[in-house]
Amino acid sequence: MNTLVYSIDDNAENAKTLYVNLTNKCTNACVFCIRTTVDAIKGKNMWLENEDITTKDVIAQLEKFNKPEEVVFCGYGEPLMKLNVLKGVCAYLKQNNIKVRINTNGIGNVVNNRNILPEIVNLVDEISISLNAPTEEQYNEISKPKSKKAYKEMLDFAKKCVENDIKTTLTVVDEHPDYTLDIPACKKIADEIGADFRVRKWLNNGY
Ligand code: SF4
């Protein structure tokens, strides 16, 4: 069975935060990606048997848990590549007064060929966007994006999230053995666009 909903809490049934795994597809191939080191989280295989996922499928798995405080879209792929399913699940979560956060690589407007902010602004409370590096050159080394314009696209998406009053956080992964980050330069970028900034320590088991 596809693992569409998972918890990193030992007491999964009563977890305050649940995570949704919508897809294994991604436009990046980050050097720190958990997908390169781990197949399962808390014993749940994160590789999907198929990508034919519906909103109903996700809600059915959510309802196996007690009501959480928050649901985070964060799986073995880029959640905004499954925009319609994501919007359907978010609508259900909002109806049930559950907070919604999306962790994204920031290419939502590109993969969907339009500005998606008007479609998600009332469905999402928080968005975390992978800045990954303070320069386009280092971003390309770390994130290995398919699109040559990915860095600019990601920053443009982040600006639009801030403009739409979504609580926006730019994130970087520090202490990875393959690169060194200029953290103050990364924070400056977040400050300039009005986003929060978070440094995550690299852990090779991902959590
Ligand atoms: S954007 Fe996320 S899912 Fe995609 S390769 Fe990077 S870490 Fe992995």
Image (cartoon, rainbow, N blue to C red):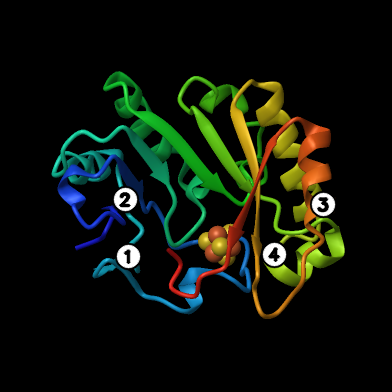
- Residue type for callout 3: Pro
- Pointer 1 and pointer 3: residues touching (CB < 8 Å)? no
- Pointer 2 and pointer 1: residues touching (CB < 8 Å)? yes
Name the mark nearer the viewer: 2 or 1. Answer: 1
- Quarter of the image with the N terminus is bottom left
Out of 76 and 53, give the one closest to the viewer: 76
Label placed on residue 184: 3
Q: Earlier in the sequence, mark 2 or mark 1?
A: 1
Out of 57 and 136, give the one closest to the viewer: 136
Label 2 C-beta lies within 8 Å of the nearest ligand 1 atom: no
Residue 99 point in image, percent of width and height: 39, 29
Q: Earlier in the sequence, mark 1 or mark 3?
A: 1
Label 3 C-beta lies within 8 Å of the nearest ligand 1 atom: no
Name the mark nearer the viewer: 3 or 4. Answer: 3
Which residue has dot 1 on it?
Answer: 48
Residue 169 point in image, percent of width and height: 63, 39
Residue 37 point in image, percent of width and height: 46, 79
Q: Earlier in the sequence, mark 3 or mark 4?
A: 4
- Residue type for callout 2: Ile
Horizontal placement of 93 versus 157: left or right?
left
Residue 111 point in image, percent of width and height: 61, 48
Which residue has dot 4 on it?
Answer: 146
